[in-house]
Image (cartoon, coloured by chain):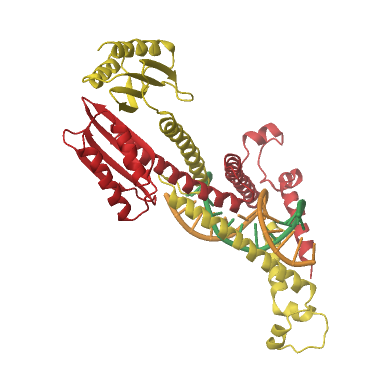
Chain colours: A yellow, B red, C orange, D green
DNA sequence: TAGCACACGTGAGGC
DNA sequence: TGCCTCACGTGTGCT
């Protein structure tokens, strides 16, 4: 039995032999042609079987190299445009990419929801006092309060006091005042997802609206 | 000369032989030990050089396989979360990923700019009348008008009339009124990128502010 | 048939 | 030393 090492070295030798000039010369099909390089370059075909095979292998490995380069250049781009990249190896780059894509997607949909809600929905204040509360879907603890009432000096601070009293934090507010009446939409956070927080907020805001 | 294919097949056979029980049995260093499996599992070393090498190679190829699987599973995830994927090969997936990441980033920063502008920037109306116009960066034809003035019945329609007179379209508006004074931020489109449109809008709004 | 995309095993080099 | 990552050339299957 031959050893593995010997066999591998043997293979290398065989490979080299197949690539070598002597093999090519010896095994080419006998044809009427010059052996000069010039001739062989201008009429590069036909060739011997082994030669064809080698050429194909070379082509193959080159195209594979191009493919690798294509992919790797994309990795380079990703490494460049991704912030907070600590580990630079391929798996980590892909992992971070996935995280960022998902985070960005979430961000966009959230911002769009808020933006859409405030741009389209806000209209003029109604003639009668109104108060409406609702939970924002998909966002635990965030609720939206819509209220219309008479405008008056001190309304702002009364609102602020009411919110403080129930420990609500206004993360976004839209207000429009026309002809002495005002409509506000407040996005309030910090009251939990349940109905107790909503009830507290409702009572507090009712006081603000109806107490001149 | 043997052929390449024959040699490779030979190598496979040799590899199998090295992995086989018969080889292990025959080539172990002569030691005083049982030949039972239990013994050989608890004291699995020492081994011959070739055996060690083969074991290392196997370990290597297996860990490499794990690495490939890690990376490929990330590709699978990307393929799953990316919309509009037509070509599914690795290079295309990466390319699409890059496009989407950049698009999402742009989206987020745009939305954040609008959102931030309305959430953080809007403060209480000042005590003196003010008017400020600016072009929105990266958004041709969109300009932002900030104004503070006395609130009064009819201010709203006066504003609307002024905007109509310069053919400006309000794509977004934020207003807050406190204690009889009002502050508005209007995003106006349709006046072009130049300074003529801005001048027209400025004159029109000035009239609204200073005419009680 | 050629071309492309992929998985594989292996050698090299970095901690 | 061992483990990890990468690039490489090659075999294979699909179109």
Q: Choose between B58 and B203: the one closer to the eye.
A: B203
- Name the residue: 29% across, 50% down: B200
- Name the residue: 34% across, 23% down: A183
Q: Choose between B138 and B57: the one closer to the eye.
A: B138
Relative image position of residue A61 (x, y in whole percent): 65, 64
| B162 lies above or below A9 | above
Q: Quadrant of residue B110?
A: top left
Relative image position of residue A148 (x, y in whole percent): 35, 19
Number of numbered callouts drawn: 0
Relative image position of residue A24 (x, y in whole percent): 74, 78
| A95 lies above or below A146 | below
Q: Can residue B169 be seen by looking at this rendering? A: yes
Query: In this rendering, would B115 be left or right of B84?
Result: left
Could you tell me which quadrant the N terminus of chain A lies in?
bottom right
Q: Choose between A187 and B55: the one closer to the eye.
A: A187
Q: Quadrant of residue B70?
A: top right
Q: Choose between A27 and B167: the one closer to the eye.
A: B167
Relative image position of residue B52 (x, y in whole percent): 62, 48
| A197 lies above or below B36 | above
Could you tell me which quadrant the C terminus of chain A lies in?
top left
Work out which residue is located at the far left of the displayed protein and give it. B128
- Name the residue: 44% across, 18% down: A134
Q: Can residue B123 be seen by looking at this rendering? A: no
Q: Quadrant of residue B83?
A: top right
């Amino acid at each position: 039995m031959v050893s593995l090492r010997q066999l591998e070295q043997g293979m290398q030798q065989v490979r080299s032999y197949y690539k070598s000039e002597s093999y090519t010369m010896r095994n080419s099909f006998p044809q009427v042609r010059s052996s000069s390089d010039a001739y062989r370059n201008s009429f590069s075909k036909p060739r011997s079987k082994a030669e064809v095979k080698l050429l194909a292998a070379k082509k193959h490995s080159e195209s594979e190299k191009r493919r690798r380069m294509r992919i790797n250049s994309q990795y380079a781009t990703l490494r460049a445009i991704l912030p907070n990249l600590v580990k630079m190896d391929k798996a980590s780059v892909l992992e971070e990419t996935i995280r960022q894509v998902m985070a960005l997607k979430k961000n966009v949909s959230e911002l769009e929801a808020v933006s859409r809600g405030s741009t389209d929905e806000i209209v003029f204040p109604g003639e009668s006092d109104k108060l409406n509360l609702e939970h924002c879907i998909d966002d635990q603890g965030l609720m939206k309060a819509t209220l219309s009432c008479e405008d008056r000096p001190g309304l702002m601070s009364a609102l602020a006091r009411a919110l403080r009293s129930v420990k609500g934090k206004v993360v976004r507010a839209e207000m429009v005042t026309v002809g002495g009446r005002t409509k506000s939409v407040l996005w309030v956070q910090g009251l939990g997802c349940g109905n107790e927080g909503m009830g507290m907020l409702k009572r507090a805001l009712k006081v603000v609206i109806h107490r001149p």
